[in-house]
């Protein structure tokens, strides 16, 4: 995974710091992006939302995202570690969505980014810009005490957004929107598997990309929500399709195997026997209704 922060704990820059990435990517740290000019869109998780001037984006660690800024646009981004932002939370960064709002309200914009357009009014945006200017000036000289002041400005920005969007944030917290978001993500993955089940090269990386998830996040999500790895999810679907084809068609076993994504008929038969206790041909004869 490519890391682009100059400092591990906290880093702030504008577009002149380095060129923006132009393909979906992820990183191990938190990120906030602030659009200073140039309307665009943001792709975060499975959501595509507007990202005009005065908008802010809050990105959790490991969350796949892309914000394609126009050439004449301007932006500031802030990268910071979990240890810098929330040192009291010792959980895996992939589990941050499960932290109750009451325990860490400052996580709210990050958790519900896919549901809200964080577009500020002029007065609030001016306040954010003032805080950003102070952060950038301070970050030039990391003398003793500066780290704590930077953290204070960061919390002021996050707190300002939480205050301005308090009602939708609280409503999303009460409705367990994070869990619904995970269900929607898994639904996208299952749709991709179903549509590509005949492809022997069907793999985790491609399915994750189709659902706009990182492979690491998808693996974690599957373990939490289903208790199964991706390979088992695919195998279950292939065995389900195999049963349907065996019982509802007269296709030769080799064609059934290929239709379920198996290149090798012998390997298909071994997998089927392990799952059902019988090889495919015997399973068909034992379960088909005689004419």
Image (cartoon, rainbow, N blue to C red):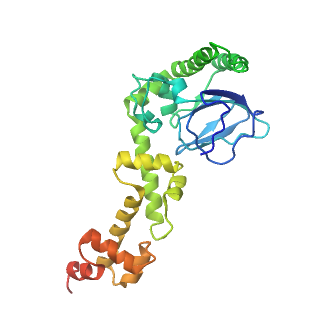
Q: Position of residue 6 (x, y in %)?
A: 68, 32
Q: Position of residue 203 (x, y in %)?
A: 49, 61
Q: Position of residue 165 (x, y in %)?
A: 52, 23
176 or 63, nearer to the observer: 63
Could you tell me which residue is drawn at 48 percent across and 33 percent down? 111
Q: Is residue 185 visible?
A: yes
Could you tell me which residue is drawn at 53 percent across and 55 percent down? 210
Could you tell me which residue is drawn at 53 percent across and 24 percent down? 85
| Placement of 251 over or under 160, stated as above or below | below
**Tally of numbered discs:** 0
On the image, which quarter does residue 88 sit in?
top left
Q: Is residue 244 visible?
A: no
63 or 159, nearer to the observer: 63
Residue reaching furthest front? Answer: 144
On the image, which quarter does residue 80 sit in?
top right
- Give left or right: position of 112 versus 16: left
| Placement of 279 over or under 6, stated as above or below | below
97 or 89, nearer to the observer: 89
Report the quarter where the C terminus lies: bottom left
On the image, which quarter does residue 190 sit in?
bottom left
Could you tell me which residue is drawn at 45 percent across and 58 percent down? 191
- Give left or right: position of 233 versus 43: left
Q: Position of residue 224 (x, y in %)?
A: 36, 45
């Amino acid at each position: 995974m490519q890391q682009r922060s100059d400092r591990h704990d906290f880093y702030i820059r504008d577009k002149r710091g380095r060129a923006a990435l132009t393909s979906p990517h992820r990183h191990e740290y938190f990120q906030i992006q602030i659009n200073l000019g140039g309307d665009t869109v943001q792709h975060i998780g499975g959501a595509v939302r507007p990202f005009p001037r005065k908008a802010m984006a809050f990105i959790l660690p490991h969350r796949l995202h892309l914000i394609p800024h126009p050439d004449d646009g301007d932006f500031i981004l802030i990268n910071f570690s979990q240890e810098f932002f929330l040192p009291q939370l010792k959980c895996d960064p992939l589990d941050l969505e499960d932290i109750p709002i009451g325990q860490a309200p400052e996580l709210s914009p990050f958790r519900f980014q896919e549901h809200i357009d964080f577009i500020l009014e002029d007065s609030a945006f001016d306040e954010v810009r003032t805080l950003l200017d102070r952060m950038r000036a301070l970050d030039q000289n990391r003398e003793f005490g500066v780290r704590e002041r930077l953290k204070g400005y960061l919390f002021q920005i996050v707190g300002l957004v939480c205050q301005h969007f308090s009602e939708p944030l609280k409503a999303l917290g009460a409705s367990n929107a994070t869990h619904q978001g995970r269900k929607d993500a898994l639904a996208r993955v299952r749709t991709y598997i179903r549509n590509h089940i005949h492809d022997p090269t069907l793999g985790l990386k491609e399915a994750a990309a189709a659902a706009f998830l990182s492979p690491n996040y998808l693996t974690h999500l599957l373990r939490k929500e289903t208790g199964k790895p991706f390979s088992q999810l695919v195998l279950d679907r292939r065995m389900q399709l195999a049963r349907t084809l065996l019982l509802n068609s007269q296709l030769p076993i080799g064609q059934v195997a290929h239709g379920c994504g198996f290149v090798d008929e012998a390997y298909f038969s071994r997998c089927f026997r392990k799952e059902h206790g019988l090889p495919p041909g015997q399973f068909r004869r034992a379960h088909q209704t005689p004419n």
